[in-house]
Amino acid sequence: MTTASVTPIILEAIVRKVAIAATYNRVEMTLAPHILYTKHGDLHIDAVTLARDGRPPKEIKLGTFKVAGLSAIRLTPRTFSVNGLFKPGDAKYADETVMAVER
């Protein structure tokens, strides 16, 4: 999958607040994407990891994932709520945001 082909899936997940499943660094992940943005000209998402290889994470945190590093991206039936760790006004998103969840 190319970045252009997965972007609509990520955008839909953000708008509908639906988790995505993907492989990242050979690990199967379930992610709650909160924002799609550009950094150094590349697309990234900041997302909460809901599961890593089928197991919940040890701690809840907002991680950054380079979209080009995600493969086999697909929507899941799992919905999510906006996590309080997500700060849409963060300086790193200024003038770089493509789409973000609404509270």
Image: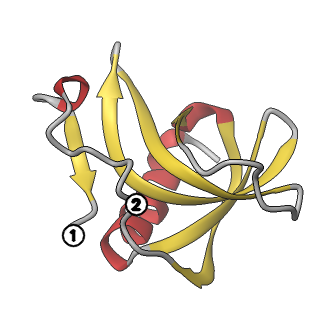
Q: Residue at x 75, y 52 (%)?
A: 57
Q: Residue at x 89, y 56 (%)?
A: 53
Dots 1, 2 in contact, CB < 8 A: no
Q: Depth check: 50 or 16 in front?
A: 50
Task: Identify the residue at the far bottom of this view.
Answer: 77
Indicate whether 1 appears above or below 44.
below
Disc number placed over residue 87 in the picture, else none: none
Q: Amino acid at mark 1?
A: Arg
Mark 2, Cα crowd under 10 Å, few <14 / some 14-19 / many 20+, is some
Q: How is the image coloured?
A: secondary structure
Indicate whether 80 appears above or below 45.
below
Q: CA distance from mark 1 to mark 2?
A: 9 Å
Q: Residue at x 60, y 82 (%)?
A: 78
What residue is shown with label 2?
A: 83
Residue 69 position, x and y percent, is 65, 32
Q: Amino acid at mark 2?
A: Asn
Q: Quadrant of the C terminus?
A: bottom left
Mark 1, Cα crowd under 10 Å, few <14 / some 14-19 / many 20+, is few
Residue 22 position, x and y percent, is 71, 55
Task: Tell me the SS state at disc 1.
Answer: loop
Task: Tell me the SS state at disc 2.
Answer: loop
Q: Earlier in the sequence, mark 1 or mark 2?
A: 2
In this figure, what is the number of numbered marks? 2
Q: Residue at x 86, y 62 (%)?
A: 55
Residue 36, image quadrant: top left
Residue 66 position, x and y percent, is 54, 31
User: Taking 75 as reference, is 96 left or right?
Assistant: left
Residue 28 position, x and y percent, is 83, 53
Q: Depth check: 29 or 4 in front?
A: 29
Disc number placed over residue 103 in the picture, else none: 1
